[in-house]
Amino acid sequence: MIIAIDGPAASGKGTISKRIADYFSLPHLDTGSLYRLAAHHIIENNIDPYDINNIIKSSKEINFSEKKLLDIRDSNVSYTASIISQYKELRELLIDYQRNFASDGGVVDGRDIGTIIFPNADYKFFITASLEERANRRYLQYKEDNIKLDRNSIKTDIKDRDLRDMNRKIAPLKRAIDAVEIDTTSMKIDDVIDFIVKYIHKGMKFD
Ligand code: DC
C-alpha cells in the first residue's frame, strides 16, 4: 500500500505521515529531507543556489540513502532547499530513490508525491492549514528546540516558500485531483490521524 501525503510548509504532514506509517507498519519517507540534504551539501560547499551546473555536479556526490543528515530544519536550509528544488535535473536525480524506497509500500510525504512520484498511490491526502496556524506551529517547534525566531519572520519565510513551491514550472506543489484535502487549521493531530485511518480502512473494505 502506498500512501501519498502532500501539503505546504509546516502543514503538519511530516508528523501525520510518521504516525500513519507507524499505524500501518509501513516505512516512512519525508522527501523534503532529500532536498534539505542537497541544500545542506551545497551550503557546506559554498555553492551559489542559482549555480545550477555546480549544484547538479555536487548533488551527484551525495549518498541519498545516508540518513544521518536528513533532519536539518534551519531557515537557511529550508530557503535553499526551496530554491534548488526548482531545478528539473535535481528532481530527476531523486525520482528513483523515492520510488525504490516505497516499492514494497510506504507512506511518502512531500509536494509532488500524489502528482508525479506516485500518481497511482492507493491513497492520497493533501494536508493544509491557514498560514497563521502553520507559522504558529513552526514557531512553537523552534521554541521547543531553543531556536529564537520571531513569528513574523517565520510567517514571511513560509509564505515565500509556498509561493515558490506552488509557482515553479516543474512538479509544483498542488493537490492531485484524486487527493482528499484535509484542512487541519482547527483540528487536533489525533483527529487528523483518526480521520485518515478510518478513511483508509473504509477504502480497504472495498478493494
Ligand atoms: O517538506 P519540507 O518543508 O522539509 O521541504 C523543503 C523544501 O523541499 C520545500 O520548500 C520544497 C522542496 N520539496 C520539493 O520540492 N518536493 C518535495 N517532494 C519535497 C520537498
Image (cartoon, rainbow, N blue to C red):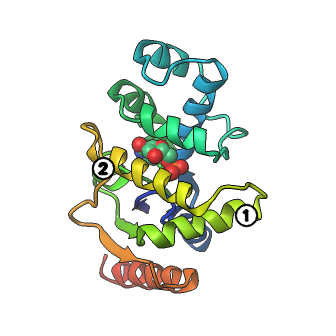
Q: Position of residue 56 (x, y in %)?
A: 46, 18
From the viewer's perspective, is 92 left or right of 143? left
Q: Nearer the viewer, residue 71 or 96?
A: 71
Q: Residue at x 23, y 66 (%)?
A: 178
Residue 122 falls in image quadrant: bottom left
106, above or below 32, in the image: below
Instruction: Work out whether residue 1 can be spotted.
Output: yes
From the viewer's perspective, is 71 left or right of 134? right
Q: Mark 1 near ligand 1 (CB under 8 Å)?
A: no
Residue 190 falls in image quadrant: bottom right
Q: Nearer the viewer, residue 13 or 29?
A: 13
Q: Residue at x 43, y 82 (%)?
A: 201
62, above or below 191, in the image: above
The residue under label 1 is 143
Q: Position of residue 162 (x, y in %)?
A: 38, 52
Which quadrant would the N terminus be assigned to in this image?
bottom left
The residue under label 2 is 166
Residue 6 falls in image quadrant: bottom left
In three-dimensional space, the C-alpha distance between marks 1 and 2, rounded to whole angstroms, equals 28 Å
Q: Amino acid at mark 2?
A: Met
Q: Residue at x 37, y 68 (%)?
A: 125
Dot 1 surroundings within 10 Å: few (below 14), some, or many (20 or more)? few
Q: Amino acid at mark 1?
A: Lys
Which is more N-terminal, label 2 or label 1?
1
- SS for callout 1: helix
Q: Which one is in front in this view, the residue at disc 1 or the one at disc 2?
A: 1
Dot 2 surroundings within 10 Å: few (below 14), some, or many (20 or more)? some
- SS for callout 2: helix
Q: Position of residue 142 (x, y in %)?
A: 69, 59
Q: Nearer the viewer, residue 105 or 164?
A: 164
Q: Nearer the viewer, residue 142 or 1?
A: 142
